[in-house]
Image (cartoon, rainbow, N blue to C red):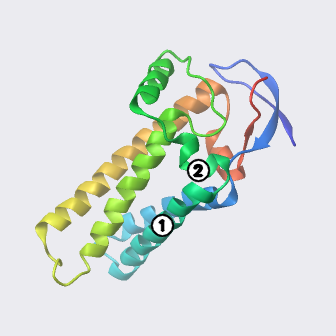
Amino acid sequence: MSEWTHTSAFARPTRDVEVHVWDRFVRAFHWGVVGLFVVAFVTADRFDALHEAAGYGVLCLLGLRLVWGFIGPSHARFSSFARGPRAILVFLKATLRLKAPRHLGHNPAGGAMALALMAALAVVASSGVALTVPALDGARWVEALHEGAVAATLGLVALHLVGVLVASLEHGENLVRAMITGRKRAPDL
């Protein structure tokens, strides 16, 4: 365990012990999907083979993540972060007042965002696969679904980044670093 000191505009400086939160698969899934989505986005209408390969990669990772969401360690399980609309709204209201409680795993808004991003990526990738089916190639409704899902995903990504920034500042911890190392500050006792 390592100890470190943090300062934040919103959280008081403390001396902390880190604990393991995000397992290797969750971290690999997160960054793998980020990389594949970027590749697919950049190669759209330019390099079809690479674009399609990235889309199939996203689908494979989503399938594995779905299984891991039921059998993985505690913080990887959907049951640990899937919350209802009321819990999400209560958390968001507290966030607006900069008084949201800190969560070791996903907070209610972060859990909802993770699920929304996975659903949006599933629509993006599966509609992309549909476009490779000869009977649907050129079908305007499938193209519109694919492009609309990409736009929605980009919007969700922007909201996700804002949420990560706000939560990092509010609780005085670097959530990007936590998704790289898998470690976060231990819960306050």
**Relative height, residue 126 to residue 93 (above, below):** below
Q: Residues within 10 Å of mark 1 (few under 14, many from 20)?
A: few
Percent of width and height locating residue 58: 45, 67
Q: Pick the residue in front: 155 or 23.
A: 23
Name the residue carrying label 2: 77
- Which secondary structure, mark 2? loop
**Relative height, residue 188 to residue 141 (above, below):** above
Please give the label number shown on residue 185.
none
Q: Residue at x 38, y 58 (%)?
A: 121
> Would residue 31 be seen by someone viewing this image from the given angle?
no
Q: How many tags in the picture?
A: 2
**Relative height, residue 113 to residue 5 (above, below):** below
Name the residue carrying label 1: 63
Percent of width and height locating residue 132: 26, 80
**Left of 57 or right of it: where is 100?**
right
Q: Residue at x 67, y 23 (%)?
A: 8
